[in-house]
Image: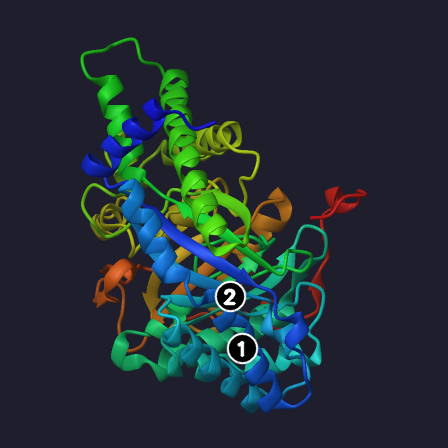
Amino acid sequence: MFDDHEIISTIEMVRNENLDVRAVTLGVNLFDCISHDLEIFKKNIRAKIVKQAANLVETCDAVGEKYGIKIVNKRISISPIALVGGCFSSDQMVEIAHELNDIAKRVHIDFIGGFSALVEKGIATGDQALIDALPKVLAQTERVCASVNVASTRSGINMDAVLAIAKVIKKAAELTSDEDGLACAKLCVFSNIPQDMPFMAGAYLGVGVADAVINVGVSGPGVVKRAIEKNLEGRSDLTLGKIAEVIKKTACKVTRVGELIGRKVAQNLDIKFGVVDRSLAPTPTVGDSIGEIFQAMGLTSIGVPGSTAALAMLNDAVKKGGAFASSHVGGLSGAFIPVSEDLNIANAADKGFLSFEKLESMTCVCSVGLDMVPIPGDITIECLAGIIADEMAIGMINSKTTATRLIPVPGKKAGDKVYFGGLLGEAKVMHVPNHTLCDQFVKYGGRIPAPIHSMKNSPS
């Protein structure tokens, strides 16, 4: 499956075009750790995670060094805490989060995801306890990531959950006002959340997955950009269809190497290999940008007319290339368009090429949604809930994953600069039209019914 020519070719990408394995994520099933005694539960999860992850970082570094491909992040995803810790109170949930944070430090991983709840059809006691705990958890821990699935094509949109999460986001931002609301960067709100995604902050280990599994996230927007540019040099006959083929072939090559790295890590840890998520995930580094791909394809900037069509083509070509390369492609496998994490996208928003409304429209065809978007701190809870509901509706109706990672920056308004650091990057607060409205719509609660095409005998 992997020949020398492919490996050598990809090593050239590593040297010159910012290719890396963005994340190796170890999924750990915690259902055998359940106990009604909090101390026993914490002891059980510590023993289970430490046993599985003790050599994760060391192994990733060794495999990366062997193949000359850097593994940027080493992470852990766990069974949803709202399920395995459903008997505990909100205060006890906070204790569990601190335990998880300490475990993450002990095994030297970057983040641990799975402080999660699945509430698309209703909020159970454990779900409510977790939601109530979220502001403190996000503010008080450095490495614990959370996700809440509030909608699906099969179930509709749980508007009670949407409103509750909007309140959580506002409170978490206030608790970290001295860091520009940084706590919100660790919370994703989903429609149709995948169970095998290696990327944070949304990763968790789904029900029905193996006891332990290695999932890999491979990125490489710089590789795709350079491949397009190389094929355009000195040619006038390159149509959009041929550009899509270039993207597809590049995605195929990168996916093959991502799977190779993942399988080697899994083999060395004696853990099952899960999936390779072939998502284009940018960084704030120049040359490692999704936005620059749009410019390579002939657009002035991401956000101008034609951007949605270009993103649809990009996302589709990445998925097709990944599907050809591996029978174990999972997660999202497409293109992210996070504002602060992509220097080019942040600049496009600052210069007026990319508006909030255009960003939302582009999420109809991207892999995630409104990702790492700093918004005015005085946005009302009702408006915030409305934005989340709109994004969930896009996912529900289109049978795709969508998500929001919105950051209402306390004390700042549109145009003010925010800095989150590291891979989270920096940007200016985006203008959100009508952000001070307090409309009644989101307060009615209940569930927006699932669409008619959900009435089929298949899961969603």
| Picture quadrant of residue 306 | top left
Q: Closest to the observer: 16 or 336?
A: 16
Asked whether residue 215 appears in the rendered view, the answer is yes
- For the point 24% across and 46% down, which residue is it? 348
Q: Look at mark 2 in the image and give the residue it sits on.
A: 52
Amino acid tagged 2: Gln
Could you say which is closer to the camera, residue 367 or residue 387?
Answer: 367
Q: Secondary structure at mark 2?
A: helix
| For residue 398, above or below residue 43 | above
User: Which quadrant holds residue 317?
Assistant: top left
Locate residue 304, reporting x and y percent.
Answer: 31, 37
The image position of residue 408, as x and y in percent, is 36, 70
Q: Is residue 188 visible?
A: no
Label 2 crowd (10 A; few <14 / some 14-19 / many >=20): many
In percent of width and height, residue 125 lies at 69, 81
Quarter occupied by residue 205? bottom right
Q: Is residue 21 above or below residue 237?
A: below
Between residue 60 and residue 253, name the one nearer to us. Answer: 60
Q: How far across and down, in percent of the image, does residue 156 sit?
A: 69, 56
**What number is the disc on residue 47?**
1
Marks 2 & 1, CB-CB < 8 Å contact: no
